[in-house]
């Protein structure tokens, strides 16, 4: 039987997913604001001076993709188990939705962590850059 706590749990899951998805565009904008000048005005000397950041930019995307893919890879098996064991149960739709929300959250979490981590790291580096006056 469907209970209010099941619905409340789905609502909390949806709110967490919305929070993750909502934070990523702002963090992406911060990251782009730091990285585009690195690449736009970059001659070979500038890129070589920032080689660590260029390598990080190159390697982080496939890594985040694979982390997200592996985190949500169990969804088909989980959905099959729920579907097979829930035939005729009125709460099947809630259980399926809960499994899908969990997989979506698990898939977004590594990407969100990478994007927001980059924004924090690059903002911290910009603030403490040499030659900048502190107030």
Image (cartoon, grey):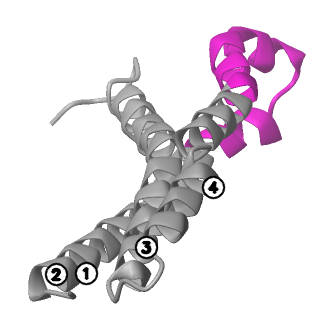
Q: Earlier in the sequence, mark 4 or mark 1?
A: 1
Q: Is 51 placed above or below 76 here?
A: above
Whether tag 2 and tag 4 are in contact, CB under 8 A, the answer is: no
Q: Residue at x 71, y 23 (%)?
A: 59
Is residue 29 in view from this perspective? Answer: no
Q: Earlier in the sequence, mark 2 or mark 3?
A: 2
- According to the picture, the residue beneath numbered tag 2 turns out to be 8
Q: Nearer the viewer, mark 2 or mark 3?
A: 3
Viewport quadrant of the C terminus: top left
Spot the residue most to the right.
Answer: 44
- Quadrant of the rendered image containing residue 62: top right
Judge the density around disc 1: few (<14), some (14-19), many (≥20) Cα neighbours within 10 Å.
some
Whether tag 4 and tag 1 are in contact, CB under 8 A, the answer is: no
Q: Residue at x 45, y 65 (%)?
A: 85
Is residue 95 in view from this perspective? Answer: yes
- Residue 25 drawn at (x, y percent): 52, 64
Q: Is 55 placed above or below 64 here?
A: above
**Between 40 and 115, the one nearer to me in the picture:** 115
Alpha carbon of mark 2 to alpha carbon of mark 3: how far? 21 Å
Q: Earlier in the sequence, mark 2 or mark 4?
A: 2
Alpha carbon of mark 2 to alpha carbon of mark 4: how far? 24 Å
Mark sitting on residue 86: 3
**Between 84 and 21, the one nearer to me in the picture:** 84
Q: Which segment is the magenta one?
A: 33-59
Q: Nearer the viewer, mark 1 or mark 3?
A: 3
Alpha carbon of mark 3 to alpha carbon of mark 4: how far? 15 Å
Alpha carbon of mark 4 to alpha carbon of mark 1: how far? 22 Å
**Between 45 and 34, the one nearer to me in the picture:** 34
Q: Earlier in the sequence, mark 1 or mark 3?
A: 1
- According to the picture, the residue beneath numbered tag 4 turns out to be 76
- Residue 70 drawn at (x, y percent): 60, 36
Whether tag 1 and tag 3 are in contact, CB under 8 A, the answer is: no
């Amino acid at each position: 039987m469907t209970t209010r706590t099941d619905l409340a749990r789905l609502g909390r899951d949806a709110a967490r997913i919305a929070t993750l998805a909502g934070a990523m565009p702002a963090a992406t904008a911060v990251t782009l604001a730091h990285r585009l000048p690195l690449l736009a005005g970059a001659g070979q000397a500038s890129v070589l001076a920032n080689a660590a950041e260029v390598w990080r930019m190159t390697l982080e995307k496939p890594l985040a993709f694979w982390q997200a893919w592996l985190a949500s890879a169990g969804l088909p098996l989980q959905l099959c188990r729920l579907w097979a064991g829930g035939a005729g149960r009125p709460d099947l739709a809630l259980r399926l939705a809960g499994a899908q929300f969990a997989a979506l959250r698990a898939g977004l979490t590594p990407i969100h962590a990478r994007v927001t981590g980059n924004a924090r790291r690059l903002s911290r580096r910009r603030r403490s850059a040499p030659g900048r006056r502190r107030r």
